[in-house]
Image (cartoon, rainbow, N blue to C red):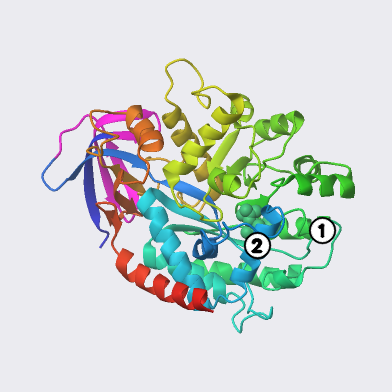
Amino acid sequence: MTPVHTLWFDQALLPDGWARHVRLTIAAGRIAAIETGVDHAPGDERHVAAVPGLCNVHSHAFQRGMAGLAETRGPADDDFWTWREVMYRFLDRLTPGDVEAIAAQAYVEMLEGGFTRVGEFHYLHHTPDGRPYANPAELAERVAAAAEATGIGLTLLPVFYAHADFGGAPPKPGQRRFISDVDSFAGLVEGGRRAIAALPDANLGVAPHSLRAVTPDELQRVVALAPIGPIHIHVAEQVKEVEACLAWSGARPVAWLLDHHDVDHRWCLIHATHVDAAEVAAVANGGEVVGLCTVTEANLGDGVFPTADYLALGGRFGVGTDSNIAIDAAGELKMLEYAQRLTRRSRNILVAGEGGSVGSALFRGAIAGGAQALGGGHAGVSGGPGGLSVGAAADIVALDTEHPSLIGRSGDALLDGWIFAAAGGGVVDCVWRHGAKVVERGRHRHASAVARLYSAALRRLLAT
Ligand code: NGQ
Ligand code: ZN
């Protein structure tokens, strides 16, 4: 029998805007009906304010285990590339059990913060000595197990990684756990498909790691392995990367990609940080999404994407927690606006028109772009509309309107209070994922068990 239940909210953010007295009927994990302007009925579970769960378009779950461990200064100037060395040393020793325990902790934190789906950009494929596991998709299965245990929606993005730099440079020893050729990668994609088969509304795409890590020929063949799923790629995160791409091809990375591929709505350009005005316009006028991970981009000293110019041209974006240095959905949206305020020395930038709420514009933008980038909410089809709509997965966040930063507010002001004024969290009250309540009073139902496994893994890893 299909379980059916009803949730009633005093107010809820629907695709057309805030509505009052909203009843959602949930059946088999999906929103079967939406009524507005109705009284609650016996049997309705009642809450005050509902918003759709956000999509986290870009995560490397295992990096949660090294959060805060790369904040001491090295012998010379530190940058993205010295951080990457620290990251490579950390991942060197991870076992499959570690990968699962760390991912589960990361996913619990994502759900507790209001993310209900994650795009896992999964590139840790092999054993510590760089050989495939007996089951080549072992680590994808660990990621899927973490998603299953925590309930988060999973868009698995197996990563193709073959080279250390533009021009097909051979991989470095620190990259040995990532490396495939296109044929063995096709096996990883198939293994990924099997790994997620039992998960509700999981989705599968492919992720060529970056233009550095693939040759043009490999990129063509990897993209062809995902005829319908999302395609994610790191692009133009570092100035050095832009310069290397110019030296190699005469074009900047984003321009090169747009020139050589039919970059459509299935593509998500992660960290399109360093783009010139022509690239901004071309991406905004195309169908793709940019994946902005501003907390990580700040942490790694990447630079600032010209978000205001891009949005003014109608560009679409999703947000991601990437390195998982701090897993905080509202914090990602806040940093997006604050980076613009700091560089432009003005306020209330990423919203069009007088009277517009910045928090609401950011939240709704991230809902739409995130759904497009990860798909899955609508029967595994990339590009679903997202949000609380009939047929969508019941991925719902109830806000604690008694939080000091939300008191006395309604509608968009709740989003502004959450995003800008509620440092330290505490705003997310309940989260339903695929219709199941996985977070209550801000706490995931398996938080303690997941934390125990995480803590055992971390103690062992940090002791060695
Ligand atoms: C990653 N992370 O794959 O984890 C990358 C670093 C690289 C970010 N770009 C490695 N934030 O890009 O080579
Ligand atoms: Zn990344």
**Residue 197 visible, this orientation:** no
Label whose residue precedes the other's in the sequence (2 or 1): 2
| Left or right: residue 49 compared with residue 460 | left
Examine the rendered structure and indicate whether residue 336 appears above or below residue 132.
above
**Residue at point 24% right, 52% down?**
441
Kind of residue indicated by mark 2:
Val
**Residue 388 visible, this orientation:** yes
Whether ligand 1 has any atom under 8 Å from the Cβ at mark 2 is answered as: yes
Q: Main secondary structure of the magenta part?
A: strand
Q: Position of residue 91 (x, y in %)?
A: 60, 70
**Residue at point 77% right, 59% down?**
214
* Label 1 element class: loop
Q: Residues within 10 Å of mark 2 (few under 14, many from 20)?
A: many
Q: Nearer the viewer, residue 341 or 194?
A: 341
Magenta stretch encompasses residue 30: yes
Magenta stretch encompasses residue 333: no
Kind of residue indicated by mark 1:
Thr
Q: Residues within 10 Å of mark 1 (few under 14, many from 20)?
A: many
Badge 2 vs badge 1, beta-carbon distance below 8 Å? no
Q: Quarter of the picture for ligand 2?
A: bottom right
Q: Position of residue 421 (x, y in %)?
A: 36, 35
| Left or right: residue 365 compared with residue 228 | left
**For residue 153, what is the image quadrant?**
bottom left
Marker disc for residue 215: 1
**Residue at point 70% right, 32% down?**
280
Query: Mark 2 = which residue?
Result: 159
Find the magenta span and give its range. Answer: 12-40
